[in-house]
Amino acid sequence: MEIELKYKLGSRELLEKIERDRFLLSIAEKDSAATIAMKAAYFDTDDRLLMKNDISFRIRKEGDRLVGTLKWRDRDTGISGLYARDEISVPVADASCFLSPDPYIFKDSQEGQAMLEALSGQPLVLIFETVFTRRRFRVDSAGTICEVSLDTGEIIAGDSRAPIQELEIEMFSGSRDELIRIGDRVAETYGLEPEPLSKFARGKALSEAGETQQLM
């Protein structure tokens, strides 16, 4: 399961301040910092079968690596900006999957089999993309391991675009309470507001708005 906090960043200056934050640096794992170019493509059927079932199908290029990810079942955490969602990620060897994805990459999981059954052979089409730079590093606080990511870029759906400028803190292991404590401390220091919508939710809304305009 993926568990993470998301916050809005109002400026690149704020991003750089958080990257140099004394508290985060004091719990950062040595040599864990990296800057990675990310490009992700989100796919669905023409009639949005996956989205109607709250499923996201993503192929993402992370530097030189391709990864396929299936996410489903958003859980209500009761906390704005805190996300908990089931997911499966698999390495992708075929670069053409970024343009024409093969849903059978998830065939070895029960959830992947359920998705394949629901698709019934329907082709997948590109719905929207995200292109962003991620500056990330790991932190360890009271045995809770998290990855801190600072993302800047944009969501692209046809001719429509929306900015990406956010802080993510994803918990790899440990206590959710400690994850929230880390997030609260950073948010209070810089006056951050929770990001109530994931990249997937924002991309979905952007693509739907573009389709509505085309019909008008």
Image (cartoon, helix red, strand yellow):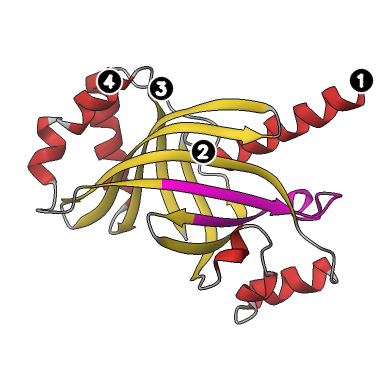
Residue underneath mark 4:
14
Between label 1 and label 3, give the one nearer the viewer: 1
Of pointers 2 and 3, the one earlier in the residue sequence: 2
* Range of residues picked out in magenta: 38-60
Residue underneath mark 2:
78
Cα gap from disc 1 to disc 2, whole angstroms: 37 Å
Give x and y (percent) for residue 139. Answer: 19, 49
On screen, residue 27 above or below 196: below
Of pointers 1 and 4, the one earlier in the residue sequence: 4
Quadrant where the C terminus sits is: top right
Cα gap from disc 1 to disc 3, whole angstroms: 35 Å
- Are the residues flagged by discs 1 and 3 in contact, CB closer than 8 Å? no
Determine the residue positioned at 81% across, 66% down. 119
Residue underneath mark 3:
193
Quadrant hosting residue 185 = top left
Front position in the image: 39 or 3: 39
Between label 1 and label 2, give the one nearer the viewer: 1
On screen, residue 73 above or below 186: below
In the picture as drawn, the residue positioned furthest to the front comes out as: 96
Quadrant hosting residue 155 = top right
Is 129 positioned to the left or the right of 1 in the image?
right
